[in-house]
Amino acid sequence: MNIQNAQQQVDEWIKAHGVRYFNELTNMAQLTEEVGEVARIIARRYGEQSEKESDKNKDLGEELADVLFVLLCLANQTGVDLEASFQKKLDIKTKRDHDRHHNNKKLQ
């Protein structure tokens, strides 16, 4: 599946199962909430905080997929071709950061 197909699948899901997209501000708040859930898992599972018993069964993949779903909703409703934007950003980062990261003593 490519990003364009994912955007289409989300749009079809919204049309089949939702009434409409939530507005952009609601989706932005929802994205923030989902990113917070990912942060909680990462902080407790891979960071220095202890993991609560109630968090041990949380699926990081599912939480990341929640972030992706809302991100795709925002792209759809704002007319962003996320695949084209991602490729453009990857090209920019490749040109800008290749030598920078190889020369970063902190990464060696």
Image: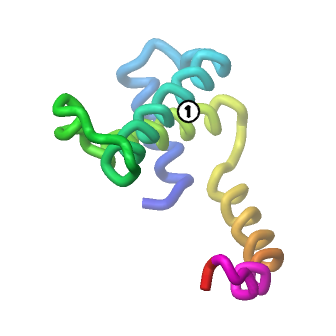
- Residue 62 position in % (x across, y down): 31, 42
Residue 28 visible, this angle: yes
Residue 11 visible, this angle: no
For this rendering, which residue is in front, 35 or 73? 35
For this rendering, which residue is in front, 104 or 59? 104
Residue 88 occupies quadrant: bottom right
Residue plotted at (56% across, 29% down):
32
Q: Main secondary structure of the magenta part?
A: helix
- Residue 25 position in % (x across, y down): 66, 18
- Residue 26 position in % (x across, y down): 59, 16
Q: Which residues are magenta?
A: 98-106
Q: Secondary structure at mark 1?
A: helix
Q: How many marks?
A: 1
Residue 49 occupies quadrant: top left
For this rendering, which residue is in front, 16 or 30? 30
Residue tagged by mark 1? 73
From the image, which quarter does the N terminus lie in?
bottom left
Residue plotted at (56% across, 38% down):
71
Residue plotted at (64% across, 38% down):
75
Q: In this rendering, is residue 90 above or below 48? A: below
Question: Relative to residue 91, is residue 33 drawn left or right?
Answer: left
Bin the neighbour count of mark 1 within 10 Å (Cα to Cα): few under 14, some 14-19, many 20 and up: many
Magenta highlight on residue 43: no
Query: Hey, what amino acid is under mark 1?
Result: Cys
Magenta highlight on residue 103: yes
Question: Relative to residue 81, is residue 2 drawn left or right?
Answer: left
Question: Relative to residue 79, is residue 73 drawn left or right?
Answer: left
